[in-house]
Amino acid sequence: MSTLPARSVRPMRNNGRVARTAGSTTRAVRLDQTCAEAVGVARSGLTGIDPDHVGEHVEVMAEGERVVTHFFECLQPGYRGWRWAVTVARIARSRHVTVCETTLLPGPEALLPPEWVPWQDRLQPGDLGVGDLLPTTPDDDRLVSGYVQSDDPAVEETAWELGLGRPRVMSREGRSDAAQRWYDGDRGPIAPISTAAPRAARCGMCGFYLPLAGSLRLAFGVCGNVYAPDDSRVVSVDHGCGAHSEVLVEPVPAVEELPTVYDDSEVESVAVSRAAGSVPDLDVPEPYGHS
């Protein structure tokens, strides 16, 4: 069975004519009645296909002069809404119709896979796993050649590395994208932990703040506080948290403990009486068997 490419322009039917649009030109193709009536010939062209998978005749469409495509319902499992397409034709001044080619095409209600997206557009932060390789393209806008003079002093300082330095360094656009992403992320000024921290507890004034080098020095640094949730991560200069080195906790006043006072005047003497025969009064102590 041959294969026809799926048509990107669906024809419009109008009184036996089919209007096609190609660029800015529009032409009408007359539906050949002899080819259109050859439904049996078209069905016989579906050789090698289980007859139970071929349903009713759906429609006919003019492809060109004396060229017509017949569509049959596809009953094959997993292809709901698809249609068998059989193209037939005849020569001029002849009523003999022959089959040109057959294929399986999606119909208006066919189940289709999602539109294919290149892998570089599908890739999301965090997708890279252990052992994975993620090569950058030669025309990556985030990188420029390392030997091109840069406007970043930190890049110029690396010129001694391996002669001309690194093969590629971050471009101005790459640094700008990274800075905006960091600033809008969880370690920027609008992060929940930053807005909940005291107003004066900003990373730029923290003793654990390690500024970056180069053009990003004025805006970003790395947190070095082991007890902070952003330890070893890039934070903005106006980010903040409760682990600031100079954060002040309002002292709680100590409760004064009073000395213990005993008041003997409040002691009341109580006489205790015994019932008769409970414990006899003996002047001589009882022997306990000790020699």
Image: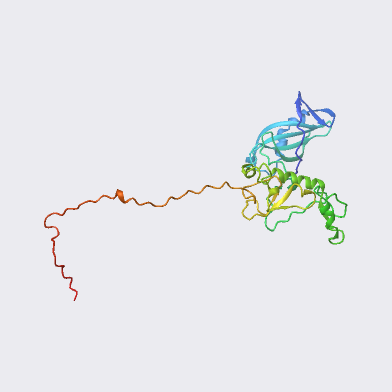
Residue in view at x 62 percent, y 40 percent = 52
Residue at the top extreme of this rendering: 15
Picture coordinates of residue 157, whole percent (x, y): 84, 56
Query: Quick one: 266 or 92, which is closer to the camera?
Result: 266
Quarter of the picture containing the N terminus is top right
| Residue 172 sits above or below residue 37 on the image | below
In the image, taking residue 228 as reference, residue 274 lies left or right, namely left
Quarter of the picture containing the C terminus is bottom left
Q: How many marks?
A: 0
Can residue 1 be spotted in the picture? no
Residue at the front extreme of this rendering: 265
Q: Quadrant of residue 189?
A: top right
Picture coordinates of residue 212, whole percent (x, y): 75, 52
In the image, taking residue 51 as reference, residue 60 lies left or right, namely right
Query: Quick one: 116 or 124, which is closer to the camera?
Result: 124
| Residue 231 sits above or below residue 18 on the image | below
Residue at the left extreme of this rendering: 277
Residue in view at x 71 percent, y 44 percent = 183
Q: Quadrant of residue 104?
A: top right
Indicate the colouring scheme: rainbow
Residue in view at x 70 percent, y 43 percent = 184
Q: Quadrant of residue 160?
A: bottom right
| Residue 145 sits above or below residue 65 on the image | below
Picture coordinates of residue 92, whole percent (x, y): 84, 32
